Amino acid sequence: RVKKKWAATQPKISSTRLALQIFDMTYGTQFAEQWPPVRASLLSEQKYGALVNNFSTAQEVVAGLEQQGAFDFVQEAFRRDCAAGPGVDGPGTSRDPSVVAGPPCAGAPESDSEPQSSGSLQDGRFPSLSPNIKCYVFPKGDITRFRPARPDRSGFLGYYLLDAASVLPVLALDVQEGHTVLDLCAAPGGKTLALLQTQACWRLAANDASGSRTARLRGVLQSYIPRVHCSEDKVRITSFDGRKWGELERETFDRVLVDVPCTTDRHSLLEEDNNIFKKSRTKERQRLPQLQTELLLAGIRAARPGGEVLYSTCTLSPLQNECVVERAAQLAQEELGISVRVVDLAPLAGLFRDVFHFAQGLRLGELVLPHLAANFGPIYLCRLQRVG
Ligand code: SAM
């Protein structure tokens, strides 16, 4: 019998190359003529945002950023929204928020649509943007890079560099004064830091299954937040498997952020290190939608009735985005008797359409598409409210 010599003869393909091949097949079909520009953007240098640290000498930091030509896209939208005044329709009221009960992705029947959403969204304006979140970006087409942040006189760093679109899930979570908040997959901590910048969380639980990444999260918080604002009674850092959280603490939190592990599309195309498209990680990659569904379900269980859950990823994949939301909502209903409804994020997207390029035609959430003139994302976000 002749032995197959796969190991010796099969040409080796890098993880980044495999990721590109798979994306070309799947996203090429999904996005059609939109795919080539999105692909080119993903393969080009990403743009960053500078999340201002209110616990540093923020005025000096802001002056420095403005001197470089950057602007605060959050507060600019906030001012525009306030100037529009009450009752003035904001952009993007198109989608009808509905209870999600069936998974069309899995071929199950579509749910009944519920009547219109929460009162605060009925006039099509986003209810509130935290006046304390400041994130600076360079204008469209300007590819200037931010300098690394420097410590102020007290040793706290002035800003945190991140994909500016990853501030959107935090804004969409709409944390209000006195809320208890759970950040289920928190490390390395960009969104935890943004949540703390709102200065609205009464208690914040920041969790990540990975011990080493939780250590990084602690390091980030130490570099940005004075201990008095980060004491153990205010910020609880844990390292549990988030899938179990719903069993530990049910119906507890006003707001839950579920920023799940995903194929991290941009990273997968550019970095061999820790690439989820490595052959040895094939099974892990294939199991991502299941893990994401379980994490979202745990987040829904952890939210109090009436509380809200924000699901986010940094992939373009519908199997990891809308399909996960639909499946988790279906399981919540069928297995736990919990109903959730989608809160329309079109008004929020409308506020930021000059800064980010949003995909059209999503049924449940919003998706920031990478664009050569505004090379942020991909970031998918979907806001759910626990009805019962
Ligand atoms: N929210 C983070 C931020 O803004 O910096 C990024 C989170 S990253 C997209 C996903 C995280 O989920 C990873 O840090 C990973 O360690 C964590 N994770 C993976 N499986 C998990 C699980 N079962 N429970 C909790 N966290 C998990």
Image (tube, helix red, strand yellow):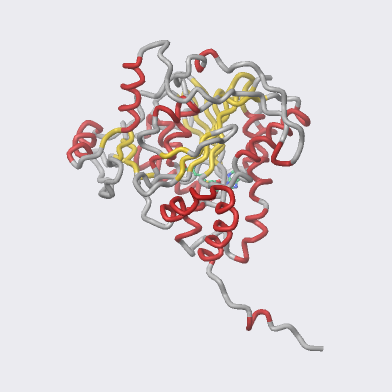
Answer above or below: position of 243 versus 348: below
* Front residue (pair 298, 376): 376
- Splitting the image into four quadrants, where does ligand 1 fall? top right
Quadrant containing the N terminus is bottom right
Res 292 → quadrant: top right
**Residue 65 horizontal/vertical position (percent):** 23, 39
Query: Is residue 156 in view from this perspective?
Result: no
* Front residue (pair 147, 351): 351
Query: Is residue 178 in view from this perspective?
Result: yes
* Front residue (pair 216, 298): 298
Answer above or below: position of 364 versus 178: below
**Residue 236 horizontal/vertical position (percent):** 51, 34
Quadrant containing the C terminus is top right
Left or right: where 132 falls relative to 377: left
Q: Which residue is outermost to the front?
A: 33
x 69%, y 83%: residue = 5
Left or right: where 309 falls relative to 216: right
x 52%, y 24%: residue = 94
**Residue 107 horizontal/vertical position (percent):** 75, 40
Res 114 → quadrant: top right
x 55%, y 32%: residue = 310
**Residue 239 horizontal/vertical position (percent):** 57, 43
